Structure formats: structure tokens, C-alpha cells
Image (cartoon, rainbow, N blue to C red):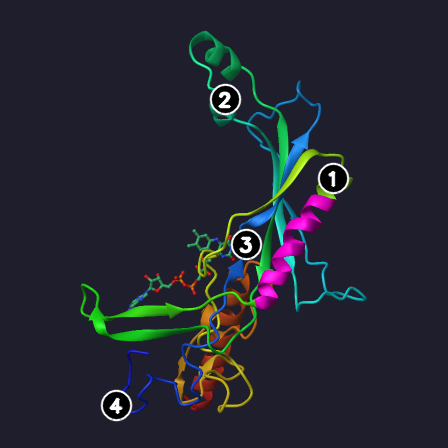
Amino acid sequence: MNSATDVWEGGLGSSSGELGHNLMDHHFRCGASGKIEGYEDKYYFGRKPGGIYIPRFRNIGNDKRDYLRGFGYQGGASRQNWQRTIAEYSVGAELKEALSEPGSWTMGLGAFGEILPYHDNKITLDKNVKDKWGLPVLNIDAEIKENEKKMRADMMNDAAEMLEAAGLKDVHTYDSVYGFGQGIHEMGTARMGRDPKTSVLNGNNQVWDAKNVFVTDGACMTSAACVNPSLTYMALTARAADFAVKELKKGNL
Ligand SMILES: Cc1cc2nc3c(=O)[nH]c(=O)nc-3n(C[C@H](O)[C@H](O)[C@H](O)COP(=O)(O)OP(=O)(O)OC[C@H]3O[C@@H](n4cnc5c(N)ncnc54)[C@H](O)[C@@H]3O)c2cc1C
């Protein structure tokens, strides 16, 4: 966006009007957790039990929700640590005694949900404010909308239902409120596409407006899915590099 503004006012590759738009992330910080009764004589040393992943199951097959797309869960079980004693307000010997024993087992499921690509979720360069290197600072103007808000209800309630079905006690849902970008999986601001009028990159991650420029990070994504994204960026990057080498050898670049 800082480059070639003499040719393209909105920056290199901005002729479609999509550069900087369709910003996506994964919305999260909601789910459920509960207590597991028993296993008080069990503890782990060294190899802590691994976390679990539950792939997306909503809006797949015959399942139809009143929102699009879905979410996956990342979760795990652990024993309560010393922080549980804060609630007891104990001091001295009583506190020491309490800390000599691990707490009860708990298990949590935290959802990661898909954010749809909205044209008005965007980044722009601030023409007035510069950072310490003299570059314009980035303005981020994005929010989750109705689709994601409806999804969040399922993200909490489905987790609680599964934990209860698994026999957990004191199951409670939580929504710790998501702020855009907290998922640190930013995507979409140089979307790939078939039509130079509606996308910034072609299917080989080449900038339509400047074929010798390749953008292979999360900016190329047209949808966010609900899974961690970086392996996909790596695969797209390997494919684009392979393509670039072949094009170079043919003399097309
Ligand atoms: C705390 C955290 C946890 C994460 N966990 C996961 C996870 O579990 N799974 C997952 O899939 N993703 C995760 N992500 C996201 C993941 O890290 C990013 O998607 C990924 O690193 C993006 O890779 P990239 O190569 O596109 O960009 P980056 O890794 O950001 O690399 C860009 C590089 O360009 C350099 N650079 C920038 N400007 C210039 C310039 N002007 N000149 C020269 N160099 C420049 C930067 O220094 C940097 O080295 C996480 C992110 C964070 C912050």
C-alpha cells in the first residue's frame, strides 16, 4: 500500500479496489469448561496429556444453522493449580497445606470460529500519523457481525453439551469477548481470485497489476476457514515459488 502510489493511488496492485479490504481473523475466547470428578490419585510427570482438537461439525452434511460456516474446538484437561487457593483466602499453615495437594481435574473446550470476508472490514494507511521510521501507521477498521455473533452462541452451548454428556460437573459457558485481531491470524487484504476486477492476486499469488510481484502470506486468503492458517500459507508459498521459477525459465517474468 506504500508502493507505486504514483501509478496506483491506493498502492501497488490496488486497481480492483480490494487491496486492504476483506480483513479476516478467527474469533475465539468463548467455549465451556467443567470439573472432572475422581482421579485425585492421578498426576502427570513430564509428559503432560496433550491437548485435543475437535474439527468443525456445524453446517456440514444435513446440519443447517442460522449462520454460515462454523468453528472447531481446541481443548484439554489439567489439574487446578495454586491459583485456586485465592478463592479460599487462606493464610499460613492452612495455605501451605492446601498448596501441597493438586486441585481437582478440569477440562475446557475453546472454540475458534470463521469470520466471513466483509468488504468493509479494512485496513488503510493513515496519511497524517507516521511511526518512528516515518512510515504511515496502519488504521484497522473491522468488527465481527451478525453471522459471527450467532455462531458464538453455538460455540459456547455445544461445548457445554459435549462436556455434560462426557460426565463433567459444574459445567459453565464463557464468552470473554473477542476483539478483532486477537486471534493473530490476519488474512484477506490482498485476496486471490479469477477476475482482476474483483481481486488483487491471481490463482498463482501474482499481483494482477504487476506480474513480477508475488504475495504469499495470509493476505491472499479469500476465506478464513476455522483452522490454524500457517501451513496453508506455506503450501501456497511453495506452489507460487515453483510457478515463479517455471515462469522465469520460460522468460515470462
Ligand atoms: C503468538 C502467535 C501465535 C500463533 N500461533 C499460530 C498457530 O498455532 N498456528 C498457526 O497456523 N498460526 C499461528 N500464528 C500465526 C502465524 O504466526 C502467522 O500466520 C505466520 O507467521 C505468518 O507467516 P508469514 O511468513 O506470512 O509472515 P511473518 O512470519 O510475519 O513473516 C514476515 C517477515 O517479513 C519481515 N518484514 C516485514 N517487513 C519487512 C520489510 N519492510 N523488509 C524486510 N522484511 C520485512 C518480518 O520481519 C518477518 O520476518 C500465531 C501468531 C502469533 C503472533
Work out whether mark 3 precedes mark 1 in sequence or the reverse, and give the earlier one: 3
Q: Which residue is mark 1?
A: 164
Observer-nearest of 113 and 150 = 150
Work out whether mark 2 precedes mark 3 in sequence or the reverse, and give the earlier one: 3
Q: Secondary structure at mark 4?
A: loop
Q: Position of residue 18 (x, y in %)?
A: 45, 83
Q: Which residues are magenta?
A: 146-161
- Which numbered marker is on residue 55? none
Work out whether mark 4 precedes mark 3 in sequence or the reverse, and give the earlier one: 4
* Residue type, numbered disc 4: Asp
Q: Position of residue 216 (x, y in %)?
A: 45, 72
The residue positioned farthest toward the top in the image shown: 93
Say which residue appears at 40% left-offset and 77% top-offset: 20
Work out whether mark 1 precedes mark 2 in sequence or the reverse, and give the earlier one: 2
Q: Which residue is mark 4?
A: 6
Picture layout, residue 22 above or below residue 172: below
Mark in the foreground, 2 or 4: 2
Q: Secondary structure at mark 1?
A: helix
Q: Position of residue 42 (x, y in %)?
A: 66, 22
Q: Position of residue 1 (x, y in %)?
A: 33, 78
C-alpha gap between disc 1 and disc 2 = 25 Å
Q: Which residue is mark 2?
A: 85
Magenta segment's dominant SS is: helix
Query: Would you say residue 226 is visible in this rendering?
Result: no
C-alpha gap between disc 3 and disc 1 = 21 Å
Asked if the residue at tag 1 contacts the one at tag 3, i.e. Cβ–Cβ closer than 8 Å, the answer is: no
10 Å crowding of disc 1: few (<14), some (14-19), many (20+): some
Observer-nearest of 59 and 174 = 174
* Residue type, numbered disc 2: Thr
Would residue 64 be found to the left or right of residue 94 on screen?
right
Q: Which residue is mark 3?
A: 28
